[in-house]
Amino acid sequence: MKAAMVGLGRMGGPMLACAVTAGLDVTGYDIAESACEAAAAAGARVATSPAAAAEGAQAVSVIVFNDRQAREVLTGPEGILSVLAPGAVVAVHTTVTLQTIVELADAAAQQGVALLDAGISGGEPGARAGTLVTMVGGSADAVRAAEPLLTAYSREVIHAGPLGAGMTLKLARNATGYAFMVAVQEAMELAATAGIDAATVKHVLEATAVAEQGWAPFTLGGPDPIGPETPVEFRRQLEHTRDLGHKDMDQALALASHHGLSTDFLTAARAAFRRSVRL
């Protein structure tokens, strides 16, 4: 399969490497020169724009940060949709709003291109190992067409339903995860106040099967505030997690409002999240 991958950062770069390892003919694009150099080192071709990357591709993965970037790389002047042939498939892995998914799918359909909303879970370790869980919304035919690319970096591809279902499932998963982070942070602070160290809290929560996902609060500094002596890369990781958390929870709350649902706990977790990442 000839594939393209646009957005080669923390997630997209390792995902591209998995696609190359799986034997796909991959072209990548990113605005960062360092990301493009890493893609070339992994064995992919590197393009100078999203359109150039997607030229002749049967399937394209989009792994950018937010709605604005997703719109730009698909429908901008040098966007993916300007070159894709009818029958191609675009998988949007970026966690975006349902409105954005519908708008992009409509734009793609005008070109005879199918669009999938394809939320991914597993973080950077999963991207590097090719063990992501990918939650997909869209037609069954489009999912089948994109399967060689999706399975290159996924241990499981879940066809959740029609367009929008994949992102809905991803937002539900993320809402749970961020609420869990807040709960762990507060547990750490409670224990620290009583003179118990964070490592002991971590051990007990793991040993009693409370924690079955990434330990972001522990890896992001524990109960101690982040100060000027904090290493730059560590602060960037914190800021990235904070920005993702705010974006994803805002989108989950907006989706709940769209469906007329009350989400009191998630609303409270959203308010507490900035404090929990210690910035």
Image: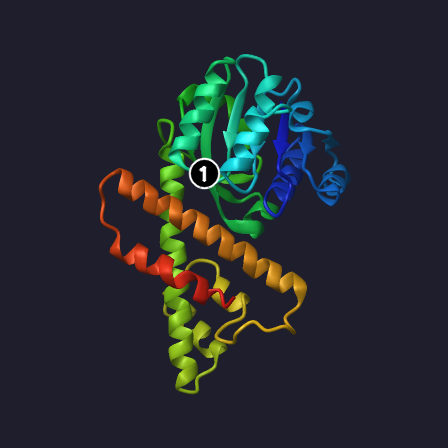
Residue 111 in sight here: yes
Report crowding for label 1: few under 14, some 14 to 19, many 20 or more residues within 10 A (C-alpha).
Answer: many
Q: Position of residue 16 (x, y in %)?
A: 64, 37
**Which residue is at a point 50% across and 62% down the rendered structure image?**
216
Residue depicted at x 38% and y 79%:
190
**Residue 263 drawn above or below residue 189:** above
What is the x, y in percent for residue 146?
A: 52, 25
Q: Position of residue 2 (x, y in %)?
A: 64, 22
Asked whether residue 93 appears in the rendered view, the answer is no
Quarter of image, res 82: top right
Residue 51, compared with residue 96, is above or below; it is: above
From the viewer's side, name the closer residue of 119 and 193.
Answer: 193
Which residue is situated farthest in the bottom direction here?
195
What amino acid is found at the position of numbered circle 1 in the picture?
Val
Residue at (49, 37) in percent of width and height: 67
Tally of numbered discs:
1
Q: Is residue 72 left or right of residue 169?
A: right
**Residue indicated by mark 1:** 96
Quadrant that contains the N terminus: top right
Answer with left or right where residue 49 lies relative to residue 70: right
What color scheme is it?
A: rainbow
- Left or right, 184 with respect to 18, comes to left
Task: Using residue 114 as the reference point, say whether residue 73 is left or right of it.
Answer: right
SS at mark 1 in the image: loop
> Looking at the picture, how far across and down is residue 274, in whole percent?
45, 62
